[in-house]
Image: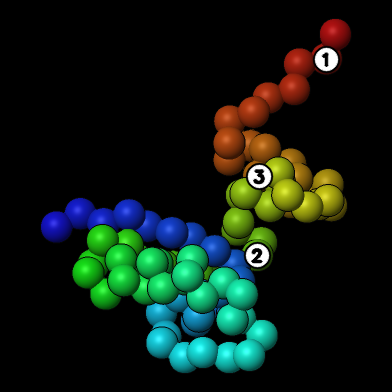
Amino acid sequence: MPYVPIYGDSHGAIFNAQNPVTQKGIKHIEICYHYIREQIEKGEVKVFAVPMTENIADMFTKNLGPTLFLKHRKQLGIEFYPL
């Protein structure tokens, strides 16, 4: 049966999605993460950890140094053409 992969570099978020523990600091997201837990239990969703240096989405959400920025830009197939 196919599943939807979810990749993330937050080990805390991955742990909370996969484990039915409730901590005081995460009560405000209880409804949201219970849905994800249900989908993980059904096998509809699988959560995978991605090292921060390999997370291409960081290019859109963080200020990266030139090395990581150029690496991720190349992985996305984005090219720069000077005028």
> Depth-wise, is mark 2 or mark 1 nearer the camera?
2
Q: In the rendered image, which quarter is residue 5 located in?
A: bottom left
User: Taking the image as drawn, is residue 51 in sight?
Assistant: no
Which of the labelled discs sits on residue 82, or is there none? 1
Q: Is residue 83 left or right of residue 7?
A: right
Q: Is residue 63 left or right of residue 47?
A: right
Q: Give residue 50's position: percent from left, percent from top.
A: 54, 65
Q: Secondary structure at mark 3?
A: helix
**Residue ID at (31%, 71%):** 38
Q: Residues within 10 Å of mark 3 (few under 14, many from 20)?
A: many
Residue pushed farthest left?
1
User: Taking the image as drawn, is residue 34 in sight?
Assistant: yes
Q: Give residue 41's position: percent from left, percent from top.
A: 27, 75
Q: Secondary structure at mark 1?
A: loop
Amino acid type for the residue under numbered disc 3? His
Evaluate if marks 1 and 3 touch, with contact meaning CB atoms under 8 Å apart.
Answer: no
Which of the labelled discs sits on residue 72, or is there none? 3
